[in-house]
Image: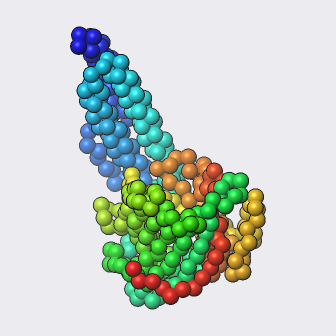
Amino acid sequence: MKRVQRSFRQVVPVVFLVAAFHLSGSSASAGDEEFKWDDSAPACGQTSQVALKGCQDSAKAGYWLAIGTCYNLSGAAEQEACLTNTKGNLDSQLNGCKEQFNARNEVCRELGEGLYDPELARRGFVKNLRRVTGNLYFPLTPGLFLTYKKVDPDGNDTNQRILFDVTNHQKKILDVTCRAVWNVTRTTEGELKESTLRWYAQDGDGNVWIFGEISEQFEQGLLAGGEGFWSAGLNRAMPGISMVSDPKNHQGKAFRQQFYLGKVENVFRIVGLVDKLPVLKKKPQWPEAVHGPYLHAQEFSPLDPGSLARPVNKYFAPGVGLVLTITPDRRQEVLVGIEKRLAGIY
């Protein structure tokens, strides 16, 4: 017991000096006092500052709780190892906060520095669910059923299938009529891997918006995670555009897909129209309905700073929708089947 107490006396001053250094250093960059919003300053940049402070404060809170846990260990060596690991985790998290801050500022430069306020009442959203049919590159026709296969970087089939099911189920979110689309990932043997329900709406100009999603992950058929949830209006989350009706006139332009600060901040960029799909290692047999011109788009998020330089690339075919997804590590989701079914109501 004496050995543990000696270690405690040796470690405590160092740890608390380190902690004080981190807290004072990071607060100098974000400020511990209440943030004062300046209406005359760029809104997007100020949002980045607020998000930085929130990220740093969250990291510090976890740091102090971890310290308390470390000092409840009975062995000196275990204490010291725990404290060293805790400090390393804090450094890593604070560095991640800074990277997200820089990434958000890059997004601000691309989207503009204005407030993000879609003003939904002025968008003229379609109120009759039967008329919510999407647009040329993002059809929402009830009963549309698309099947994709997941392919590894070497072009091999991973024996996983993604099912895209446009249903007749409707829900009003922020007084906007939304249609449910169900995405299910299964193995070829039928084992459920992921289930995602998304809510889409269509505005008066034919743009398709996303208003929320619920995502769950499964392992060996059992629920293993379900943190992928957001809904417009809940905790001030906001909807965004998933596909514009006239992409030809928006080449190079980016849009927010959803905005739930610190949780979901995806951005959608229209690269342009192309005549051919990328050449893959193993050329797929595309369904007959797949033809050009194809819409090339990219998705990224400041919550994943590396995605700004290495975004997810997506290709859409007219009258069909998404036909190919290529991730930064060269994994693919390839359309292999198009069906028209009786639209389900879930």
Q: Is 341 on the left or on the right of 35, as rendered?
A: right
Q: Is 275 on the left or on the right of 9, as rendered?
A: right
Q: Is residue 92 above or below residue 287?
A: above
The residue shown at (33%, 41%) is: 58
Q: Is residue 1 above or below residue 233?
A: above
Name the quadrant containing residue 63: top left
The residue shown at (45%, 67%) is: 196
Number of marks in the rendered image: 0
Q: In x, y percent, where is residue 252?
A: 62, 63
> Can residue 257 be seen in this snapshot?
no
Quadrant into which the C terminus falls: bottom left
Q: Is 247 on the left or on the right of 38, as rendered?
A: right
Name the quadrant containing residue 19: top left
Quadrant into which the N terminus falls: top left
Q: In x, y percent, where is residue 303?
A: 46, 50
In the rendered view, how is the structure colored?
rainbow
The residue shown at (34%, 78%) is: 172
The residue shown at (59%, 73%) is: 147
Name the quadrant containing residue 290: bottom right
Q: In x, y percent, where is residue 343?
A: 48, 85
> Can residue 72 be seen in this snapshot?
yes
Q: In x, y percent, where is residue 213?
A: 41, 67
Q: Nearer the viewer, residue 225 or 332?
A: 225
Q: Nearer the viewer, residue 255 or 260?
A: 260
